[in-house]
Amino acid sequence: MLEGIIRESTSKKETKTLRRDGYLIANIYGKGKENINAAFKENEFIRYVRNKETLAFDVKLDDGNVYRVVIQEYQKDPVTSRLLHVDLLLAQDGVKTYYQVPVKVVGTPKGLKNKGVLVYHRRRIKVKTVAEKLPNFFELDVSDLDVGDNILIRDIQFPEGVECYINPSVPVVGVVKAK
């Protein structure tokens, strides 16, 4: 389980000191809940997030509380690509919320043999659901895609209780002709 600390002060000076000490600044928020200003050791956070198996994961803060969260957004330094800030959304049971669910592709498109390139139009799909029905990822089979073919939002089978409000004709992945 990922462990962090609660930040008492949100001043610029305190934030710089925490970053210098190797901490990643985080906000934990949810519907009807008070925002929690937290910080995690940057290297531990990155290592934990890379190896997690589910979209929602548990974090424990130094006040003893355990929160189930989903990464909603993060900010990187434009020069060094170092993580600066992360927004964590509480995955509350019974509360419908918008989540960004990643897309995974399976198979090799036949269009690659015809000088095509596999292109992700969307790496994550925004869905609205309760935390209990949140899928970890959407798996798309791209083995039948030829040059000029796409998998659209309407081609994806969403599980029961998961709603997507994106235009159905928006492409998710496709094969385009290489230049």
Image (cartoon, helix red, strand yellow):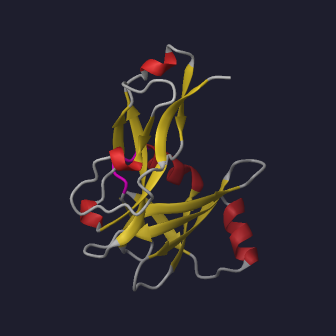
Q: Position of residue 147 (x, y in %)?
A: 51, 24
Main SS category, magenta section: loop
Q: Quadrant of residue 132?
A: bottom left
Q: Quadrant of residue 131?
A: bottom left
> Residue shown at 40%/49% (left/top)?
153
> Residue shown at 55%/22% (left/top)?
116
Q: Position of residue 42 (x, y in %)?
A: 58, 55
> Residue shown at 44%/69% (left/top)?
89
State which quarter of the image contains the N terminus: bottom left
Q: Position of residue 100 (x, y in %)?
A: 44, 58
Q: Position of residue 35 (x, y in %)?
A: 50, 81
- Between 24 and 177, the one lying in front of the other is 177
Q: Is residue 74 visible?
A: yes
Q: Residue furthest left?
A: 160
State which quarter of the image contains the C terminus: top right
Q: Quadrant of residue 60?
A: bottom left
Vertical order, 109 against 119 (above or below): above
> Residue shown at 51%/70% (left/top)?
5
Q: Is residue 137 visible?
A: no
Taking the image as shown, residue 16 lies to the left or right of residue 49, namely right
Vertical order, 49 against 146 (above or below): below
Magenta region: 51-55
Q: Residue furthest top?
A: 113
